[in-house]
Image (tube, grey):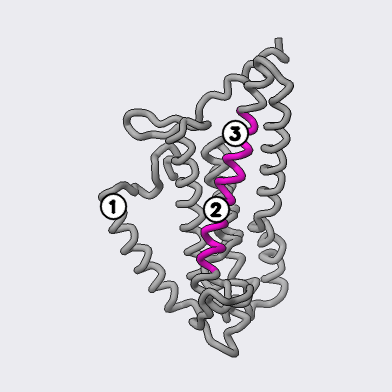
Amino acid sequence: MIDLQKPWPLGLDRKTWPLFLVAMVAIMGLLASIDVLSSRGAIEWPDTWRAPFFFITDYGLSDWILIPSLTLMILLRLAMFPLRGVWRRATGELATVSAFVFLGVGVPGLITTILKRLIGRGRPEEFDSVGAFSFQNFMNDWTFQSFPSGHSTTAIATAFVVGFIYPRLFTVLFVIGVIVALSRVPVGAHYPTDVFAGLIVGMLGAYLVRNFFASKNWLFSQSSDGRITLKPLDGVLQLIHRDRA
């Protein structure tokens, strides 16, 4: 499985980035060749087959994680003012965790939103009128904001963000994230290329935020060999041990 302590996934480093970009373009090209067939075929599945995908697809909405994490971050920061000692330290640590969750999911989502508007690809529901590769750059509405998939971005970014903090949950959330991403095709919201691009943006965006935090020594630390690990939440642990004593 993916080593979450490495600075970048998939063996990426300064030497391999060009090869990675070439590989991504090649994969996108292959997926583009089956975009129409996959999309039209999945949309025509019986309703009983499509129903589970409609059920799980909204996990990819960002509000359920962005609003609580932002609210918690603000409240915890405000709560720090009257506190002292270990309580203040623990509250600050939890506020930083909340900030990381918010930015780790929000930044990839923002990147995706910008790309959607810049690229302006028509969604599958516009296929009959404009085809699968019609674009309205810059000036567009949601019907021409198909690439990349925002739900895919959020679902996979959430898996990595939580995994950086609590690795034991990563595999489960990663599988859920991939399923959510794939669900965007049978529900008729995206083409396979949109989904794949969303997965890549979500994954790399989460790493980008984690690496930025590590560079500032916020929540994460980076060792001499480049590995990035979660710093001990000493204040939180001290409170927990105090309660158990």
Q: Earlier in the sequence, mark 2 or mark 3?
A: 3
Q: Quadrant of the N terminus?
A: top left
Left or right: 243 as drawn, with respect to 40: right
Using a 10 Å C-alpha cutoff, classify the residue at mark 2 as few (fewer than 14 neighbours), some (14 to 19) or many (20 or more).
many
Q: Secondary structure at mark 1?
A: loop
Q: Nearer the viewer, residue 145 or 199?
A: 145
Q: Amino acid at mark 2?
A: Ile
Number of numbered callouts drawn: 3
Q: Residue at x 64, y 58 (%)?
A: 60
Instruction: Judge whether residue 115 is colored magenta.
Output: yes
Would you place residue 71 above or below residue 156 in this image? above
- Pointer 2 and pointer 3: residues touching (CB < 8 Å)? no
Q: Secondary structure at mark 2?
A: helix
Q: Quadrant of residue 150?
A: bottom right
Q: Main secondary structure of the magenta part?
A: helix
Q: Is residue 194 visible in this depiction of the protein?
A: yes
Task: Say which residue label 1 marks.
Answer: 16
Q: Which residues are magenta?
A: 93-116
- Pointer 1 and pointer 3: residues touching (CB < 8 Å)? no
Instruction: Judge whether residue 10 is colored magenta.
Output: no
Task: Say which residue label 2 marks.
Answer: 156
